[in-house]
Amino acid sequence: QVQLVESGGGSVQAGGSLRLSCAASGALYSRICMGWFRQAPGKEREAVATINSATDRTDVSDSVKDRFTISQNVARNTVYLQMNNLKPEDTAMYYCAYSGGYCPPPEYYAGMDYFGKGTLVTISS
């Protein structure tokens, strides 16, 4: 079992920044893929960004890549999502995700092994 604990969500005004963190613990693989998903009210969950622990390769959604950055601290099994210039449409529950091994192709992101409980991000205009 793997446990994922997200933190860093909150309420900010448009144009502000937030940094989300997710710490993984438990029966972890030596090489892992971690990422962030979000789900806004009434919408489907969407992948925001992923990062591979072994290669540091990232994949960031086109909708946020000029504003969001994913990074990691491999030694701490922690992944971060730096979100800048936030917009009201970024309002959503943000979920951390984990899979053992390399990151899957984007079409398989929804099938990642574990998801956290989420942290709420609310952006006011």
Image: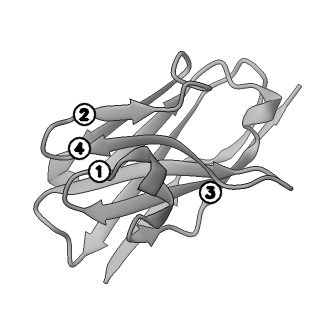
* Quadrant location of the N terminus in the rendered image: bottom left
Kindly identify which residue carries mark 1.
103
Q: Nearer the viewer, mark 4 or mark 2?
A: 2
Give the amino acid at mark 1: Cys
Kindly identify which residue carries mark 2.
57
Instruction: Name the residue at 39% across, 43% down.
Output: 50
CB within 8 Å, label 1 to label 2? yes
Give the amino acid at mark 4: Asn
Q: Give the CA distance from mark 1 to mark 3.
A: 22 Å
Q: Which image quadrant is residue 25 in?
A: bottom left
Q: Earlier along the polypeptide chain: callout 4 or callout 3? A: 4
Q: Which image quadrant is residue 14 in?
A: top right
Q: Position of residue 117 (x, y in %)?
A: 57, 69
Q: Give the CA distance from mark 4 to mark 2.
A: 13 Å
Q: Is residue 114 visible?
A: yes
Kindly identify which residue carries mark 4.
73
Instruction: Name the residue at 14% across, 57% down.
Output: 31
Q: Position of residue 41 (x, y in %)?
A: 84, 54
In the rendered view, would you say 113 is above or below 43? below
Q: Give the CA distance from mark 3 to mark 2.
A: 24 Å
Say the numbered circle drawn on residue 119. Answer: 3
Q: Give the CA distance from mark 1 to mark 4.
A: 16 Å
